[in-house]
Image (spheres, rainbow, N blue to C red):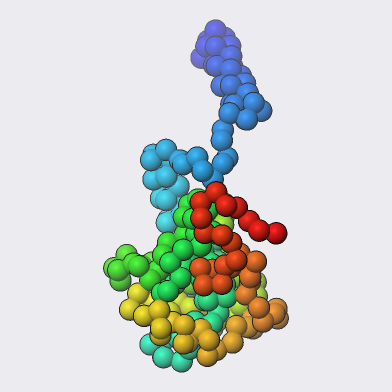
Amino acid sequence: MSIKWIKLSFIVIVAIAGIAGLFIWLGIFNVAATEKHWDATTSLLEIVRDRSISTRSKNLIVPDLTNTERLARAVPNYDAMCAQCHLAPGIEKSELYEGLYPQPPVFHKRNQSSTRKPHEAFWVIKNGLKLTGMPAWGIYNSDEQIWDIVALLSTINSMTPEQYQKLAAAGKHGHAKGGHDKSELSAAGNSNKSEHASGAGEGHHK
Ligand code: HEC
């Protein structure tokens, strides 16, 4: 390579770094959750997410998930930890669900074939997903508690609001690794208990 080309490449690299630096420093990228990604960005992020989940979960051994006691244990925990974001039969709306971007999938509205595979769902629930709002639940919950919820995810679409509410009310929310009895996000509320005015523009009552 001649000196001329080395100089030229150096100038190009410095110029690109300068433009990238300005782009960041001037705040041109909008981090607002209300500003959607381009379709191409969404597709790329989904590929990164799906490949990462698939690679990291592939050696997990799935236990027997057909045991119906799993559902009885899972629903109270799902109701306390997940329903505010992922909704549930009879809980069709929430501020967290509507405000989050990416929007959490609604498991009870999904058809069976589009649900993530059990070992992949387990991995996501245990470890969370960076930059999405999906928390890592493995910090306080045992693997068995997470498998209980994985079992629930594959049947929740066939549950009626009455069946769901009955199981939610019958059981008790708890963590294997310490914690508390109340909802994780009790202040956020769900559609049943919410104290917020539902009319548009009415805002919060303090
Ligand atoms: C604060 C909101 C929030 C809470 C609470 C929450 N999640 Fe999520 N979850 C998300 C978001 C957002 C995504 C979507 C991320 C994405 O699009 O990649 C997600 C993704 C997932 C996925 C991957 C689904 C798929 O097909 O890609 C699973 C499984 C999941 N959550 C299960 C749960 C369970 C079970 C709980 C309760 C223990 C829970 N989540 C609690 C926000 C939440």
Instruction: Give the tally of numbered discs.
Output: 0
Residue 189 picture quarter: bottom right
Q: Which of 117 and 151 is in front in this view?
A: 151
Q: Where is residue 51 in the image (x, y as percent from the top left)?
A: 43, 55
Q: Nearer the viewer, residue 88 or 9?
A: 88
Q: Position of residue 188 (x, y in %)?
A: 61, 64
Residue that lies at the very extreme toward the top in this rendered image = 4
**Residue at (33% x, 78% y) in the render:** 158
**Residue at (42% x, 45% y) in the render:** 42
Q: Position of residue 5 (x, y in %)?
A: 52, 11
Is 140 situated left or right of 116 in this image? right
Quarter the C terminus occupies: bottom right
Whether 154 is drawn above or below 84: the answer is below
Q: Position of residue 170 (x, y in %)?
A: 52, 90
Whether 51 is drawn above or below 38: the answer is below
Q: Nearer the viewer, residue 29 or 7?
A: 29
**Residue at (63% x, 23% y) in the render:** 22
Residue 135 picture quarter: bottom right
**Residue at (58% x, 21% y) in the render:** 19
